[in-house]
Amino acid sequence: MIEGIRYSKCERVIFKHNSLTDLEAKLQAADPRAPKIIAFESVYSMDGDISPIKEICDLADKYGAMTYLDEVHAVGMYGARGGGIAEREGLMHRLTVIEGTIGKAFGVMGGYIAASTALCDFIRSFASGFIFTTALPPALAAGAVASIRHLKESQVERFAHQERVRRLRNLLDKNGIPHLNNPSHIVPVIVGDASKCKWISDLLLDNCGVYVQPINYPTVPKKTERLRITPTPLHSDADIDHLVSALHQLWSRCALARAVA
Ligand SMILES: *Cc1c(COP(=O)(O)O)cnc(C)c1O
């Protein structure tokens, strides 16, 4: 999305993360006649927080802006048909463009935008990055169709996913392992030290057979280095117990602070 904005060579203004006040101030300051598009995400990948989609759409209406919502961390996982947070909140019709990926929850590869026929046609005709790239091979397209068809109907995975997340969070709480409390499936366990974060991640993999990626600067600000845990619907009780008991021991070895219940 950022590359797309750069490539458009349009003027861009950055608003403070999820701040409606700041967004409104920036919209107010903009030329009322200039075409505008507000680009944002639903579930944010590193903190797992969720944007106020409805309120942003209200501001877009008020100031005559279009909206572009990146739902890559939500498609397949939220909404009755896996359309994302905007579907869950009944807001899909209010967005100009919704972007999704087939590479995360859908487990294949590729991506899409959903917008009006005219807008999709325009992008098909003018987006050089799209025109000059090899299309998805039939095997991937077939995999994507199968996966989307399944997750459009089945709620089993979405319910199990949320339940697994609750179980993980409860167990982390019981063990005093601090994690960001957000309304999504992304469970960031804050380590706050780049080398310890990498070290814990290596030990988890080498000694415990658990793969959890360390997230260090520049992906997140310094001092907020973290392990980013995203349980899947298929992780068992034993898997989650194993992860948390490993973290419990590593927390003591690294002399990291516990959260107070
Ligand atoms: C993963 C990701 C994408 C796109 O992923 P692809 O691998 O290109 O399908 C877009 N936006 C965000 C925030 C992402 O994390």
Image: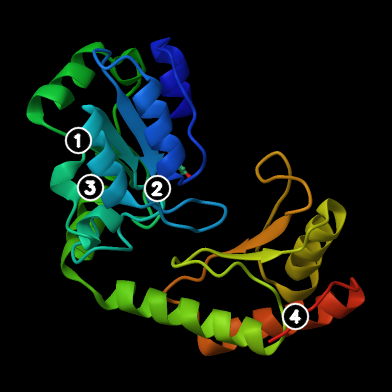
Residue in the image at 19% along x and 66% along y: 80
| Label 1 neighbour load within 10 Å: few <14, some 14-19, many 20+ | few
| Dot 4 crowding, Cα within 10 Å, few <14, some 14–19, many 20+ | some
Image point 42% across, 28% down: which residue?
A: 26
Q: Residue 32's spot in the image, x, y percent?
A: 26, 17
Q: Amino acid at mark 3?
A: Ala
The quadrant in which the C terminus is found is: bottom right
Q: Position of residue 172 (x, y in %)?
A: 64, 81
Type of residue at label 4? Ala
Mark 3 or 2: in front is 2
* Residue identified by numbered label 4: 246
- Residue to which mark 2 is pinned: 103
Would the CB of label 2 be found within 8 Å of ligand 1? yes
Which callout, 3 or 1, points to the residue nearer the camera?
Answer: 1
Q: State which mark lies toward you, 4 or 3.
A: 4
Q: Secondary structure at mark 2?
A: loop
Report crowding for label 3: few under 14, some 14 to 19, many 20 or more residues within 10 A (C-alpha).
few
Q: 27 or 127, which is in the foreground?
A: 27
Which residue: 71% across, 78% down?
A: 177
Q: Which tag, 1 or 4, sits closer to the chain's start? A: 1
Residue 37 position by quadrant: top left
- Quadrant position of ligand 1: top left
Q: CA distance from mark 3 to mark 2?
A: 14 Å
- Circle 2: residue type: Gly
Q: Which residue is mark 1?
A: 61
**Residue ID for mark 3:** 142
Query: Label 1 amino acid?
Result: Asp
Q: Residue furthest left?
A: 117
Marks 1/4: CA–CA distance:
49 Å
Q: Is residue 96 visible?
A: no
Q: Where is residue 234 shown, x and y percent of the image?
A: 44, 76
